[in-house]
Image (spheres, grey):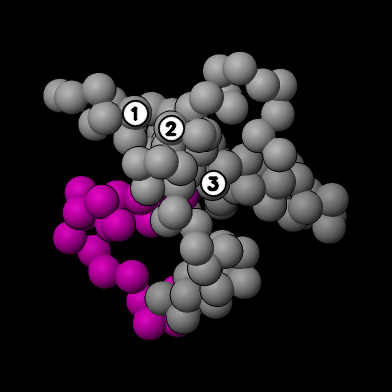
């Protein structure tokens, strides 16, 4: 693997994208519990859905996502993700992000 390929994996994909998505999932869990759902039930239910969706989306399962779930996922992406989020994979943007991560206390 090249240095650029490694940079795409870490920190761009693994920490920035997957880390942010994981943080969002944890925040969602916190909101569910705050709304009154018992913590154990929320944890089991959400972790089960995370595992199933990841297996399907990564082609590790032959199951299919239902049309209703596809609609919900599309709504969530449209509602939560910025339209230009893929810009972080641009080589110059990657260089800037890595520089900020290594030499700054904040990316903002």
Q: Position of residue 64 (x, y in %)?
A: 26, 69
Which residue is under mark 3? 21
- Tell me the quarter of the picture where residue 70 sits: bottom left
Which residue is under mark 1? 7
Range covered by the magenta-colored residues: 50-69
**Where is the C terminus found, in terms of image quarters?**
top right
How many discs appear?
Answer: 3
Give me the residue at 56% from left, 62% from top: 81
Q: Secondary structure at mark 3?
A: helix
Instruction: Work out whether residue 49 can be spotted.
Output: yes
The local crowd at label 3, few if under 14, some if 14 to 19, many if 20 or more residues have their Cα within 10 Å, is few
Q: Secondary structure at mark 2?
A: helix
Which residue is under mark 2? 95
Most extreme residue toward the top is 103
Q: Nearer the viewer, residue 37 or 86?
A: 86
Most extreme residue toward the front is 92
Q: Nearer the viewer, residue 52 or 91?
A: 91
Instruction: Work out whether residue 47 can be spotted.
Output: no
**Where is the N terminus found, in terms of image quarters?**
top left
């Amino acid at each position: 693997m090249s240095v650029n390929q490694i940079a795409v994996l870490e920190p761009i994909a693994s920490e920035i994208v997957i880390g942010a998505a994981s943080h969002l999932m944890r925040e969602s869990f916190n909101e569910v519990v705050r709304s009154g759902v018992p913590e154990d039930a929320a944890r089991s239910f959400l972790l089960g859905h995370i595992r199933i969706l990841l297996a399907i989306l990564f082609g590790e399962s032959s199951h299919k996502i239902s049309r209703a779930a596809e609609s919900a996922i599309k709504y969530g992406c449209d509602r939560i993700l910025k339209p230009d989020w893929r810009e972080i994979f641009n080589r110059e943007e990657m260089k800037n992000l890595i520089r900020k991560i290594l030499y700054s206390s904040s990316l903002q």
